[in-house]
Amino acid sequence: MFDVVMTSAFLAAPAVVILEQAGCRIHYMRPYPSAAEVAARAAEVGAHAILTRQGPVTSLGLTASPNLRIVARHGVGVDDVDVAEAARLGILVTRAPGSNARAVAEHTLAMLLGLAKDLRPLGLAIAEGGWRDPTGTVRDLNGLRLGLLGFGDIARLVAPMAQAFGIKVSAWSPRLVAEALPQGVGLATSFAALLAENDAISVHCPYTLGTHHLIGAEAMAQMPRGGFIINTARGGIVDEAALLDALESGQIGGAALDVFEGEPPALDHALRQHPRVICTPHISGVTQGSLVNMGVMAAECIAWALTGQAVPDARIVRPT
């Protein structure tokens, strides 16, 4: 029997079946456990695998159980797993590429539409007994310029969804070339050009040391005044203090955040209540379909690894 720690209270039924058929026993945890709690649970049950969805796996967790052979990410991003330490210890780290891409793309577009149409401030005005400003307007989608920071699985789905509304789409990442872009998507010549040439920036790059606070005060100052920022990637890519300042000055006209630097954000976090910020609780990739996809792909990796079968290379995460 193999013991699997699940850093969440729920795993989709098809994923449970895969693990049970491979001889695994699942030990669930409360949502958002700390690294120390994950380690303690792994040590308590002698975990052979950690299926991580809502808890960090640091060196504490990686060394907690002598049986540990794999950490499988219930999703795509692995910033909450110490990949370098896992590699040093010979522990496999896997992810589920593409499993929730469509769900996150849909959420990204919904946030963009909400910003362009001022849904939050107008809704707050109605709730407080007001009505529209006689001189007020909302933005046209047709002709709006959207810049995609990164062009992976999610951004590739956002592009045609946005184009269907007449939105002009361009993209930039350090190694992106024009030949890799679909018809109608422009290539920004630089990060600075992406910022300066678009009305909205949507973040779709990985979170690394190099992208920490990439969207900071300097970047926001290069955007057209009143521009939008959408982040469905990782919270640390956007400097939240700088974003608040830019919102207060009017340099940024609105932001939509599904992710935060600290999750959940503090109750007194200024962006929670800001009238020009749409907040959602890191839920863009959490749909019924994507929960099944992520769970199944993670469970498959665990089952294969623990029973001596090969794990597809595309799912294996290695230190960069």
Image: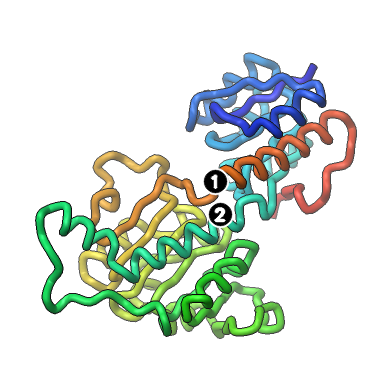
Label 1 close to label 2 by CB (< 8 Å): yes
Q: Position of residue 155 (x, y in %)?
A: 58, 67
Left or right for 49, reference 152: right
Query: Mark 2, residues whose alpha carbon is within 10 Å: few (<14), some, or many (≥20)?
Result: many
Q: Position of residue 44 (x, y in %)?
A: 63, 14
Between 17 and 73, the residue placed more toward the observer is: 17
Query: Residue 177 appears in which quarter of the rendering?
Result: bottom right
First-in-chain label (1 vs 2):
2
Q: Report x, y in % for residue 40.
A: 57, 19
Q: CA distance from mark 1 to mark 2?
A: 7 Å
In the picture shown, does residue 96 fall above or below 58? below
Residue at mark 1:
287
Q: Which residue is tagged 2?
A: 103
Residue 48, label in figure: none
Going by the image, does 91 lie left or right of 115?
A: right
User: What amino acid is found at the position of numbered circle 1 in the picture?
Assistant: Thr
Looking at numbered disc 2 in the image, what kind of residue is underneath it? Ala
Quick one: 140 or 250, which is closer to the camera? 140
